[in-house]
Each structure stands twice: as structure tokens, then as C-alpha cells.
Image (tube, grey):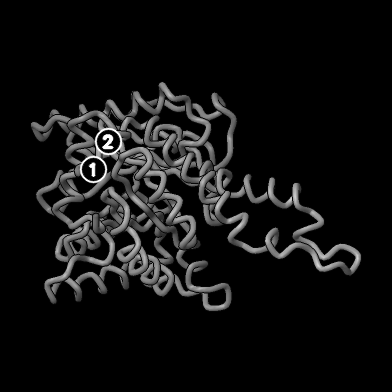
Amino acid sequence: MPIATPEIYAEMLDRAKAGGFAYPAINVTSSQTLHAALRGFAEAESDGIVQVSTGGAEFLSGATIKDMVTGATALAEYARVVAAKYPVTVALHTDHCPKDKLDGFMRPLIDISLERVSKGLDPLFQSHMWDGSAVPLDENLEIAKELLEKCARARIIMEMEIGVVGGEEDGVVGEINEKLYTTAEDALATAEAVGVGEKGRYMLAATFGNVHGVYKPGHVKLRPSVLKEIQDAVGAKYGKDKPFDLVFHGGSGSLLEEIQEAISYGVVKMNVDTDTQYAFTRPIADHMFRNYDGVLKVDGDVGNKKAYDPRSYGKAAEAGMAARVTEACQSLKSAGTKIS
């Protein structure tokens, strides 16, 4: 199947919300992690979302180039070719874009999609995330209004965040405090500013104790009921059941029952990065330890070409990450729900 069209992507999100499941959104940083994500979705018989962060996009452009738009564009074009060989439908998304990177990442990518759409093509990415969590809510919403209007013209779904996700991602650190919990007042202000779909479709990353990074199960203090509170408050005002398409960030260390409770309140997308990074790297470490004298030319010896050929450990890394993606699909109940 090809990359999802805007219509198919909307259908995917609608099916998730109606069916009580969510799609894993897997961060990738290379062609191989992309294949691992696609393989994991295929093995779970789940459609899904592949996404790239600002740091991931910069890395994809080359360690000495460091151009986020180049890296993101290259990933999207490559994905269009290889994803067609997998029996699932995948949407492409860009992850957290803070205010200081809008002009170097999200806005130029939307412009590329606007040009593509003007020629009768699909947008380059199906959705982009504006991360205004580090600015005051009023400013966050003003920028969101501008970006949503532009995304709508480019046939793109926007994702935005209100509240703050704690922990660290791509060098951005969020404090762990009361701001981790979005309020009903914040949600009502959001609906007032950007609507509930009539001004353009968007997903909302509302926070309920989420923390980026590596934590043991039970460490993260989630309150999924926060999501129900904001859905109920906004739903009552606008006469819509679960008006927001919600996104779950910072899920590592969350209990399965908390994740599935969040899904019941309208979460349709959950970001997965930390766990899949480890699942990719662990088999490589195993290979290196087991083949120490093969991957290194110890004491001037020649080593073992088959051991240090990147394909030898790359295959294991892909399989390890794919298995973790499949596990995510099972946890989020998207396994076995592919459109075709």
C-alpha cells in the first residue's frame, strides 16, 4: 500500500476513535529504523504512523549537513518508495517543533506540501506537530491558528500541544511539576481559538502527567482522568462527544491499564521512541560483545569481515525494533485493524 492519502489518514483516525484503539507513532532516524517500523506494523497487521523529530531530520540529512528540511524530505521520498512494498497503510508525521524551529522546519515543509497540492499531488507529510508548550497559552494558540489555516490549505492535519510534557527529548527539557496536567480551562481556550474541526482538523497532545525519557513502570504519575475532564468540558459546550483527537506523548514507564484508559477517552495516536531506540540498539550491543575479536582487528589481526559488515548486526537491530513496534500495536489495540 502507498503512504496514506489525506482522506485515508482521516479515515484511519476516525476508525481508531470509533474502534477504541490508537496508532503507535514510531520515531525513525534512518532508512533502517523506517524499515523496522514498517515491518513491525506489517507483522501486527496494523496501519500506523512514522514520524521524525527535528533532531532526527537533522541527522537524516547527514552529520555534516545538519539541515532538517533536507533530512525530512529525503525520509518522506524514500518512504514513499519502500512503504509500497508493505501490506499496511502508513502516515508520515513530523514530531515536536518548538517556536524557534518553526521557520527552519515546519513552515518550509508545509510550503513544500502547498506546492505539491497545487500540482494535484498529495502533501509531503500527512501531519505536522507544533509544540507550543514552552510559550504562554495565548501565544501558543495564536501561532496554532496561523499554522492550522496553512495546514488546512495543504490538506495536512496539524498536531498541537497544550500543557508540558516533562523529561527530555532532543535536548529540550521539561520540568516535572503541576504544568504536566492540562486543565479544562486550557482545553476550552483551545477550542475557542482553533475550533473543534471546522477550521481544519488537528490532533491535541493534552498532558496528564506525561514524561519523556526512560522510567521504570509505576514511576510516571499519570492521571488519565484529566483527558476525560477536558473532553467532557469541551464536548458539553460544543455538543460533540469526545471532540478532540488526542495524542499521548511520553509513554515510557506507563502502566498498560493507564495507557488503555487514556485510549478510552479519545487518544488515537501514541508516540513511541525511547523503547524502540533500545530495542534497536540492544541486538547491536549483543553482536559486538559476542563477536569482539571479529568486529575489531585485535593485536593487528584482520578481524572477521562477516562480523563487522553493518548488515550482519543491522538485520538483528531491525528485527528487534520491529518486534517492539508489534508489541506497541498489541498494547494500543491496533493489531489486526489494518484498512486493507
Identify the mark at residue 72; answer none if there is no mark: none
- 338 displayed left or right of 257: left
Q: Quadrant of the C terminus?
A: top left
Q: Which residue is mark 2?
A: 185
Q: Position of residue 336 (x, y in %)?
A: 28, 34
The secondary element bearing badge 1 is classed as helix
**Do the residues under discs 1 and 2 have CB atoms within 8 angstroms?**
yes
- Determine if residue 188 is in view: yes
Amino acid type assigned to the residue bearing label 2 in the image: Glu
- Please, is residue 216 above or below residue 149 in the view? above
| Left or right for 75, reference 317 | left
Residue 272: which quarter of the image? top left
Residue tagged 1: 189
**Quadrant of the rendering where the N terminus is positioned:** bottom left
The residue sitting at 58% across, 34% down in the picture is: 215
Residue in the foreground of this view, choosing between 305 and 98: 305
Numbered disc total: 2
